[in-house]
Image (tube, coloured by chain):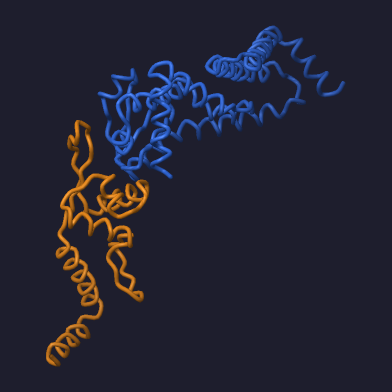
C-alpha cells in the first residue's frame, strides 16, 4: 500500500471521512467561484471562503489520520502553531513601533463618519494610509493633503482591508494554507468598494495627489 | 541630520543638514509658512520637506499649529527657536563637553587667547 492509498484508507475508515468530503467539496466550489467570478469583490469573498474551508479541513485531516504515514501533519500543526502565535503578536508589536517612531492619536470623528471602530492618525507630515489587522491608520500629512471626499475614498479603501481582516489578517492566511494571495485583486476590490461609496473621481484625485507628493 | 548626542568635527562645523538649514532660514525669515510654501521656497520636493519638518519638530526646532487657511485646515509652521539661540546652544554644548573632558586645557587656552588679543 503506498502512502496515498493509505491516506485514503485512513480517511474512509475514520469518523471524519464524510466531513473531509464535505469540506473538500467546499474548497473546490469556492476555488471554482474564485476562478470564474468577474466581480473583484466577489472574487475576494470566494478566495476567503476557499481559505476558510482549507483551514477547517486541516484539523479534520489531522484527526482522521491514524497512520503514521501522515507524520508531516504533526509538523504542520507545529508550524501552524508557531506562525499563529507570531501572526497574532505582530499587530501589537508593529503598533508599539509606530507609537515610538511617529506617535499617534485616535480620531473619533473620522471613525464615526466611516463606520469604523477606530481610526489612528499618525503624527507625521508624510501622507500615509494603511491597515493593520482591523485598525486603520492615516497620517496628519494625508489629512492636510486631501479634500474631504478624497480622504473618505482612501479611508473606505482601507476599511475594505479592515473588513477582510475581521477573522485573520488576509495576508497572514497564506502562511497557513499556502494558497496564493491575489493581492492585485484585493487592491482592486478595495478600490471598487471605495468607488461605490464616494465615486470614482475622488479616489482618482486622491491617487494623483499622492503621486505628485512623492514624485 | 540634527544630531544632539554627538558632534563631528569634520571640515566644516554645521548644526543642520543642508535642507534643514534652508528650511530653518526660510522660516526665520518668513516667521510662519505652510508645507507647500516651504517646499516652494526652498525648492525641494514636498516629501523631503515633510520628512525634514517631522525631524525638526521632533527635535524642538519647529513648532506646528493647525489653522484654517482659505477655508481648509492646514498646518502652519513656526520656528520654535531663534537663530541666535540655536547658535548659542550649539557652541555652549560643544564647549561644555570639551571642558567636561579636558577642563584645565580648555580654560588655559581661552585665557591665553583672550590675553593675546
Where does residue A171 sit, x and y in percent of width and height? 53, 29
Q: What residue do we see at 41% from left, 23% from top?
A: A201
Indicate the quadrant where residue A208 lies.
top left
> Is residue B96 toward the left or the right of residue A172 in the image?
left
Chain identifier, colour orange? B
Image height of A135 relative to A27, above or below: below
Where does residue B84 sit, x and y in percent of width and height? 15, 65
Where does residue B113 sit, x and y in percent of width and height? 17, 88
Q: What residue do we see at 35% from left, 76% from top?
A: B11
> Is residue A49 toward the left or the right of residue A133 in the image?
right
How many circles with numbers are drawn on the protein?
A: 0
Image height of A162 relative to B104, above or below: above
Image height of B89 relative to A201, above or below: below
Chain identifier, colour blue? A
Indicate the quadrant where residue A152 lies.
top left
- Could you tell me which quadrant the N terminus of chain A lies in? top right
Indicate the quadrant where residue A22 lies.
top right
- Could you tell me which quadrant the C terminus of chain A lies in? top left
Q: What residue do we see at 41% from left, 26% from top?
A: A203
Amino acid at each position: 500500500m503506498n502512502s496515498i492509498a493509505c491516506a485514503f484508507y485512513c480517511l474512509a475508515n475514520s469518523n471524519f471521512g464524510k466531513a473531509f468530503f464535505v469540506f473538500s467539496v467546499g474548497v473546490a466550489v469556492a476555488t471554482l467561484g474564485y476562478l470564474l467570478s468577474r466581480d473583484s469583490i466577489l472574487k475576494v469573498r470566494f478566495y476567503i471562503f476557499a481559505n476558510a474551508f482549507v483551514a477547517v479541513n486541516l484539523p479534520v485531516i489531522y484527526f482522521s489520520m491514524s497512520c503514521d504515514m501522515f507524520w508531516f501533519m504533526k509538523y504542520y500543526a507545529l508550524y501552524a502553531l508557531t506562525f499563529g502565535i507570531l501572526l497574532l503578536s505582530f499587530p501589537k508589536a508593529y503598533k508599539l513601533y509606530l507609537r515610538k517612531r511617529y506617535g499617534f492619536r485616535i480620531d473619533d470623528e473620522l471613525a464615526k463618519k466611516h463606520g469604523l471602530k477606530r481610526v489612528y492618525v499618525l503624527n507625521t507630515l508624510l501622507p500615509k494610509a494603511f491597515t493593520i489587522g482591523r485598525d486603520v491608520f492615516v497620517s496628519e500629512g494625508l489629512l492636510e493633503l486631501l479634500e474631504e471626499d478624497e480622504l473618505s475614498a482612501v479611508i473606505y479603501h482601507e476599511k475594505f482591508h479592515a473588513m477582510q481582516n475581521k477573522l485573520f489578517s488576509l495576508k497572514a492566511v497564506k502562511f497557513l494554507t499556502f494558497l496564493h494571495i491575489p493581492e492585485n485583486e484585493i487592491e482592486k476590490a478595495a478600490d471598487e468598494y471605495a468607488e461605490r461609496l464616494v465615486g470614482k473621481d475622488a479616489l482618482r484625485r486622491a491617487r494623483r495627489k499622492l503621486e505628485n507628493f512623492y514624485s | 541630520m540634527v544630531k544632539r548626542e554627538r558632534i563631528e568635527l569634520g571640515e566644516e562645523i554645521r548644526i543642520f543638514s543642508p535642507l534643514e538649514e534652508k528650511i530653518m532660514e526660510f522660516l526665520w525669515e518668513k516667521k510662519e509658512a505652510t508645507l507647500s510654501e516651504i517646499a516652494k521656497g526652498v525648492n525641494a520636493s514636498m516629501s523631503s520637506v515633510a520628512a525634514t519638518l517631522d525631524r525638526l519638530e521632533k527635535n524642538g526646532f519647529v513648532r506646528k499649529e493647525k489653522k484654517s487657511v482659505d477655508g481648509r485646515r492646514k498646518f502652519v509652521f513656526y520656528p520654535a527657536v531663534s537663530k541666535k539661540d540655536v547658535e548659542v546652544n550649539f557652541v555652549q554644548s560643544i564647549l561644555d563637553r570639551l571642558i567636561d573632558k579636558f577642563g584645565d586645557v580648555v580654560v588655559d587656552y581661552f585665557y591665553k587667547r583672550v590675553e593675546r588679543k
